[in-house]
Image: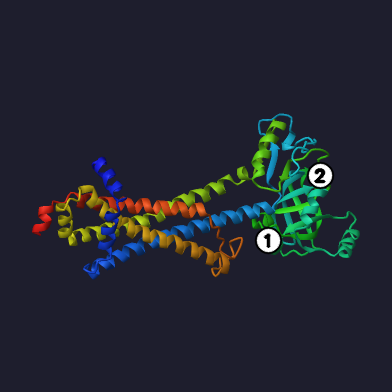
Amino acid sequence: MNVSILKSVITSTRLSWVRGVAFRYLSSKKSTQYLSFITWISVLGVLIGVTAMGVVLSVMEGFEGELKKRLMNTELHILITPKPTTRGFEQGMIPERKIDTSRFPSLELFPILQTEAILKSGRRVTGVIAKGIPPERMDLLKTQMIEKADPALLSQREGSESYPPSRVFVGKEMAYEMGLIPGDFVTLVSPTETEGPMSLVPRLKRFVVAGIYSSGMPEQELHTVFMDFGAVRSFLRHSTGITHWEGRVDDLEEASILKVELEKQLPDLKVQDWKDLNAALFFSLKLERILMFIALSFIILVASFNIVTTLTLMVQEKRREIAILKTMGATTPHIGGIFLVEGLTIGGLGTLLGTVTSFTVCQLLKRYQFITLPDIYYDRSLPVIILPSYFAGIFVTALIIVMSASIIPALRVARLDPLTGIRN
């Protein structure tokens, strides 16, 4: 392909008479019904491809936004844990220390004492993560309570035991799976054995369910129970130390900046923000979005083949007119520019209508939410986030594809011999 001819063809589309001839050919009444049908099929194909791409990418962005919103409702935005290579931390325990957060007013850090255990209620057993939290973190947890035990009932349960049970807060999903209600007794079994009169025995401790929380994260609700810091310390029989710190920020985007500052302050500890903790999930979403963009681009690519067919048929129909234009002085780039304008008009119309249609569909999905999702999703309604940058990118991508498809027949017709066109 001669690059100079291609540049000349593209430049010739700026001429008003070239555009005028192109529009006249498109609206010509002499065109056959079959050619008109193929033209509209080409427009419809591009329209469907652009619409599908805009709607799918907006919905995928909505799912990612919904996930970030769920993460914002949790208290684990920054996690500080001991490094595996750091010496002096026994059994993964961190000596209690004061972390200076005076320069970070939006950051709240909570010392956590955590262990894996087995929760037993009657004959039902499940593995859990038991978290001992300080009073400040307990105040935040109480704002997520959906059911609480009656204070009189708790006092009665605690007063009826020789060793009063500690209070535990379980998630909504766990309460459903285990059949628990506030006021029930549960037993926590540690996988770490302790010495008994005859041999090693499992470590047991009885708790009473003081409340059921709902964090909006089913995975956390199913596997995590909360209790007072002292209750876990008594259960583990650790007199000092914590397992990690959990940090909460007002703005998720601040977490990355705070992570860098905390790493400077705590060189012997590992600092992770919410992006690091969910890196695999967000990478999967990003990869899916890229793959969907590529896959849906093929719809537009296939539709552009119809544009090639349309222009080829139109060249066959207008051979005589093309020959006459050449004998009147039209140059090769001018003839190519006419059919390039026709291809861009067909593809541009489909792209414009597709962009408007996809935007309208997204607005309808966002406003009326007439699509209901299965129970496995966080929310039953279809999340949609409309980003102008997505629609602009889709519009440009579609135009590039249809322009590339239009160039091939435009260059072929530009080399048409005028004498052959007049004879035929």
Q: Is residue 237 visible?
A: yes
Residue 370 image-quadrant placement: bottom right
Give the number of the mark in front: 1 or 2.
1
Q: Give the image location of residue 43, x and y in percent.
A: 34, 63
Residue 174 image-quadrant placement: bottom right
Hey, what amino acid is under mark 2?
Arg
| Quarter the C terminus occupies | bottom left
Is disc 1 in contact with disc 2, using a CB cutoff of under 8 Å? Answer: no
Viewer-side residue, 288 vs 227: 288
362 lies left or right of 316: right
Mark sitting on residue 233: 2
Residue 4 image-quadrant placement: top left
Hey, what amino acid is under mark 1?
Glu
Q: Is residue 302 visible?
A: no
Looking at marks 1 and 2 on the same chain, the residue that comes earlier in the sequence is marked by: 1
Q: Give the image location of residue 287, x and y in percent.
A: 49, 48
Q: Which residue is mark 1?
A: 173
288 lies left or right of 334: right
308 lies left or right of 416: right
| Quarter the N terminus occupies | top left
